[in-house]
Image (cartoon, rainbow, N blue to C red):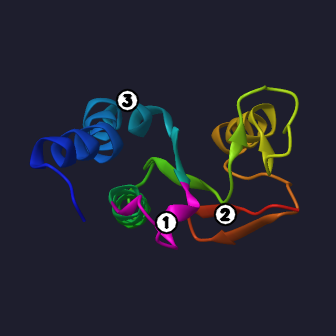
């Protein structure tokens, strides 16, 4: 991988450390109210994307962070309910239309809202593995 250390550091800060900062800042609050945390990740966590190695590495690290947080929080009474939605495909930026992409932004937003409100969703193209909800193209 050809990558300058400064670029790597920024990628780690933007794509992984940001989640850690949210956890450290806000997890004490939901513990008091039995809240939920939903991270959003991509399918690159499972399959390397050519010329995007750092993104695949960081997506896999974020997925593991979600699993670790889930395991740490579950034993606690009133622990934070941890989830990650892994979107396995591109998201169109138009909120109401997929424009040939696997997912429309509104569709992804509705799933995240379901996960935040109830901890689950009724979407049929999801594969669930513990705290990980894999959104698959139809």
**Foreground residue among 88 and 82:** 88
> Is-magenta flag for residue 49?
yes
Q: Nearer the viewer, mark 3 or mark 1?
A: 1
Along the viewing direction, whichever of 47 and 30 lies nearer the viewer: 47
Task: Confirm or deny contact between disc 2 and disc 3 (CB under 8 A).
Answer: no
Q: Nearer the viewer, mark 2 or mark 3?
A: 2
| Residue located beneath label 3 in the image | 29
Q: Is residue 40 above or below residue 51?
A: above
Disc on res. 10: none
In this image, 86 relative to 72: left or right?
right
Q: Position of residue 18 (x, y in %)?
A: 30, 37
Residue appearing at x 35%, y 38% in the figure: 27
Q: CA distance from mark 2 to mark 1?
A: 17 Å
Please report the residue visible at 25 percent of the width from the left and 37 percent of the height from the top: 24
Which numbered mark, 2 or 1, is in the foreground of this view? 1
Is residue 73 at least partly visible in the picture?
Answer: no
Q: Earlier in the sequence, mark 3 or mark 1?
A: 3
Q: Are marks 2 and 1 in contact (CB under 8 Å)?
A: no
Residue at position x 41%, y 34% in the image? 32
Q: Position of residue 62 (x, y in %)?
A: 38, 57
Which of disc 1 and disc 2 is earlier in sequence?
1
Q: Looking at the picture, tell me which residue is in the foreground, 92 or 118.
A: 92
Q: Taking 134 as reference, is 109 above or below it?
A: above
Q: Quadrant of residue 84?
A: bottom right
Task: Judge the density around disc 3: few (<14), some (14-19), many (≥20) Cα neighbours within 10 Å.
Answer: few
Q: Quadrant of the N terminus?
A: bottom left
Local SS, label 1: loop
Q: Residue at x 38, y 66 (%)?
A: 64
- The residue that disc 2 covers is 134
């Amino acid at each position: 991988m050809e990558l300058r250390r400064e670029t790597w550091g920024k990628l780690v800060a933007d794509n992984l450390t940001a989640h850690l900062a949210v956890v450290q800042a806000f997890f004490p609050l939901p513990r008091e109210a039995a809240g939920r945390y939903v991270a959003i990740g991509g399918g690159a966590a499972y399959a390397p994307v050519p010329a995007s190695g750092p993104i695949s590495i960081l997506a896999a690290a974020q997925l593991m962070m979600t699993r670790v947080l889930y395991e740490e929080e579950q034993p606690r009474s009133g622990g934070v309910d941890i989830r990650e939605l892994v979107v396995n495909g591109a998201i169109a930026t138009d909120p109401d239309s997929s424009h040939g992409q696997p997912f429309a932004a509104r569709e992804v937003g509705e799933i995240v809202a379901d996960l935040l409100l109830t901890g689950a969703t009724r979407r049929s193209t999801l594969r669930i593995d513990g705290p990980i909800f894999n959104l698959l193209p139809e």
